[in-house]
Structure formats: C-alpha cells, structure tokens
Image: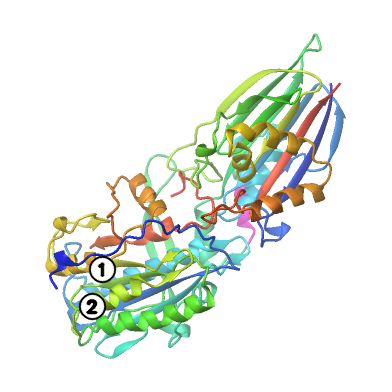
Amino acid sequence: MPIRDRKVVIRLFMPYIAEISRTNPSCFVFLIDQSGSMQDPFGSLTGTKTKAMGVADAINRLLQNLVIKCTKSEGIRDYYYVSVIGYGGKGVAPAFTGPLKGKELVKISEIGNNPARLEERRRSVEDGQGGMTEQTFKFPVWFDPTSYGGTPMNAAFQKCTSIIVKWLAEHPNCFPPIVINITDGESTDGDPFQSAYDLMTLSSADGDVLLFNLHISSSNHKPIEFPDSEAVLPDAHAKLLFSMSSPLPEYMRTLVGKEGILVSYNTRGFVFNADLVSVIRFLDIGTRPSNMR
Amino acid sequence: MKVSSHCFRLPKQGNSLLEYEDSAWPLDPTELDCQSFRCAVADGATESSFSDRWARLLVEGFNRQVDLADLRQAWQDEISTIELPWYAEQKADSGAYAALLGLVIEEGTGSELSFKASSVGDCCLFQIREKKRIMTFPDFTFESFDSTPALLSSRTGNSREEPEELTTGGDTEPGDSFVLLTDAIASWTLRHPARVEERLLELVSLQSQEEFQGLVDSQRNNRDAEGRPAMKNDDVTLLLIEIKT
C-alpha cells in the first residue's frame, strides 16, 4: 500500500487525562534498532559517530531524563514501568546491559539505581556572571552501541504489542503507554505498518497507545521535529515512520506549540535526526514551572 | 487590630503529609493584637525536588522579610549537607520551584487599616466583606490555571527568566476576611463564575480540619463526564485570615 494512502484514525475524543501516580503508573517501551545498517555514519553531526552511537546516546539520555523526571527528595517515585527491547541480527530481546540485563519490564526506580556504569562527562554551563564554564557531570549508561544483521521491526512491534497487552490488562485505567521506536527505518522483515497500527490502536480507558518514532539517519538533511505533514520529510523511510507515528494528544500539541513549533491536528510524534527528550518533558506528573530548564 | 488565622492543608490523595509540598505561615491557629500582620502561602512544584523545603523557606522568609538571595543560599546550604545519588544530584541542580503569595495587613496612625499583597505564580487571594467578594488577586479566572506557571527558583541562573511579581493593595476593615489559596483549590473556587462567592463562603465557614478534608475529598471524587475531577488531585492549602471587630 502506498504510504500516502495510509491513514491513522485520529480519535480526538480520547482524553489523555489519567493521573500518572505510584498507584496508577504508566508504561514506556523503547524499541531500539540494533541492525548492521546502524554502523553507518550518523547525520551531519560528526564524521566519526555511527548511527548505533547516536541510538545509544538517545536511549541513555531518554532513560536519564525519565529517571530524573520521577525523582523527588526522598528518591525515585515509580510513576513508570519501562521496557527496552532491541531488534537486530540476534533477534528481538531485552536490551539492557549491566545489572538489568535480560529483564523485560522494570520499575523506573530500578533503572535509576542500576545503570551499567556512570561515565564522567563534561558540559558547558552558565557561570552566573554572563559567561560559560566547564562542569563535570555523571552520565548513566544502560545501553551500549550494537549493530549486527537485519532489522526485524515487524517482530519488534509484535513483541511490544504482547508486552503492552499484558500491561493494559493489569492497568486498564492508566495513562496510555508510550512507545518510542529509535531506528534508521529500514525494516527487513516486511512492511511494519500493520504491526505498528495494531500497536497504536491498543488503548486504556484514557486513550490509545502512543507510538513515537525517532528516525536516526545518515542524511545531512536538517533535523525535523514533530511535523504535521510527510511533505517536509526527506526520504521514503522517514515518510513510512511518519505514517506510523501517533498524532499528538491535545495537551502535548499545546506544549509543542509553546516550544515554537507550528502544530495542527495532524502533528505527529516523529522526529528526524533530532532529540526526543522533549517527550519526557511533556509528561504531566504535576506542576512543571514554565521557567524550569 | 485583632487578627486571627487558621490554616487547613492536605497532601495530594495517595501521598502522606510528609510528601506535602505546599507551605503556609502561620501554620498554627493564631490570634494576635498587633499593628502589622504578615502571612503567606507557597506551593512547591511537583516536578522539582526539595520544593517542600523551598516553599517553607519562602513563607518563613516572607514573614521575617528576608531577601530572596539569602533564602536561595539557605536552600543551597540545606541541600549541600545531604549525600545524593546521581539522579537526585542532577535533579537538585535544576533547583526547586515554588509559587508564593504574601499578604501584609497594617494599622495606620489613625487606626485605619490597609493591606498589601504580592504574588509570583498561581496562588490566589480573595477579600470578603459582608459575604461579598470584593477583591481577587491576581485577577485570575478558571482558565488562568495550567500546570506550567512561572515560579520562583531556588537557584539563580537556572530559570530562563525571573518570573514577574505582581502586587496589589487597598483598604480593609474589621469584619473582613482574606482567603489565601494554593492553585488546586483556587481553580476549584473559580471554576464556575456564578458560584465563586458561594464557594468562598463555604471555605470561610469551615470550622475544623475534618470539615476541610470532607470538602476536598468530595470535590476530588466528583468527576465530570470525561472523568475530570472538580478539584485537581494536588496538595491543597487554605489560609484563612479574619480581622476581628
């Protein structure tokens, strides 16, 4: 079926207002492309970084931000259960390294307390006097770059569907699970659209599962965030991933709009060679100051 | 002048009072005969950590008229004594955030009474005279409340900008009541324009923590057709000030 003929039914009436709390947690599934094509260079950012390295950075940053999102004075509150599934030449399987290796679904507090390692990294920060200064910080790593074999994206969506069906049976009133698929878009086990669609049409009482795609590409095309039309996308892989990305719920659309991005009812949870950490920022677990960085 | 204050507060449903992140000054019931009375409520943001400490420092600081820079230093000093895992350290680096609303009532030389109020964020103040609402500050409506207000940060340099402080002032007289509210109960109060006075009078007439809890529980569980509660599940604080005749 040509991509242009594919329609994702937008169920505007779904509220997406369920409270995310320790007594009513929600679920995140990250799907990570670990195929051989991920050895290719990543975008225009550097000549040495591979797409696999870009994926590893992306998933580690997403997990880091999700842990920090759930951190309060006394520790990490289990607002989320998280699964990280890799797909590549070795099949479809949990992808954590370190103490969580082999685990399929874990509490966010387990993730925060069990990175494989903490790396010392440096970043530039404001010095409070109008200048910049270098600061050391700890960067947690749960996932290392991996690239081998084919891209069984269909099988990955089917695995994800089985995890979420079980989750929804146990948490029928939760804020809908969010799935983030990080890939270069080249599925080798057939057209993944139907598998993705089956996943996106699962629902809790509060709304359909949200499938967001982060497209990591070797293309030098500028980053694209939350487009509302495939016309702006550079290639067929991007257009395919766009077609199987969920339309943003109203409150997320509003927050994306506040970030200066033009939005419409067809704005999708899709980014191209860009950062999806903003999705973590959009999760509503209570008051978030507008002036908080 | 004679002033009394009563504070009613509840944590978010499902949380304990230890996890309550609002604050108020004074917390305990107070009856004073004084020339100047200062009180405040603060609402620590859920998304930041150690915001309960920041909210407490802000209301105590308002009462003692301490500079914001000194309060920020006090918060930093408190946090720096705690050994934190990587995630708590990085969260604390972002600072704590809170809304603050302060009220000062003063007696003039001729025994006339006046008030001044200041606000950053989404707490709300009402003045009631003879069972009528005569002042709302800031001039909020139900639509004014969202979950992303600009708030006071415990760290400089972490905010994109310092949030705007609003101020107001006016006359008051014996018999007046002032109602200071944090955002969840303030938005409930303003939800239906025709019922604002009715709801304020319901708050002013509360006699006990049990009555307060009954009201809040019933409104948290009262849901519309889409499942939205009449009162958002959040920490709630009501500080009731009465100027006695």
Q: Is residue A96 magenta?
A: no
- The correct choice, above or below, for A11 with respect to A144 in the image is above
Figure quadrant of the N terminus of chain B: top right
Locate the C terminus of chain B by quadrant: top right
Secondary structure mainly formed by the magenta segment: helix
Q: Which residue is mark 2?
A: A192
Residue depicted at x 72% and y 29%: B178
B78 or B236: nearer the eye? Answer: B236
| Extreme residue in the bottom direction | A90
Work out whether residue A47 can be spotted: no
Q: Is residue A80 visible?
A: yes
**Do badges 2 and 1 share one subunit?**
yes
- Residues drawn in magenta: B75-82
Q: Residue B54, percent across and down?
A: 63, 47
Image-quadrant location for residue B204: top right
- Density class for disc 2 (Cα within 10 Å; few <14, some 14-19, many ≥20) is many
- Residue B127, above or below B52: above
Locate residue A250 relative to residue B84 in the image: left or right.
left
Q: CA distance from mark 2 to mark 1?
A: 9 Å
Query: For residue A244, which numbered disc appears in the image?
Result: 1
For the point 60% across and 23% down, the residue is B168
Disc 2 + disc 1, Cβ < 8 Å: yes
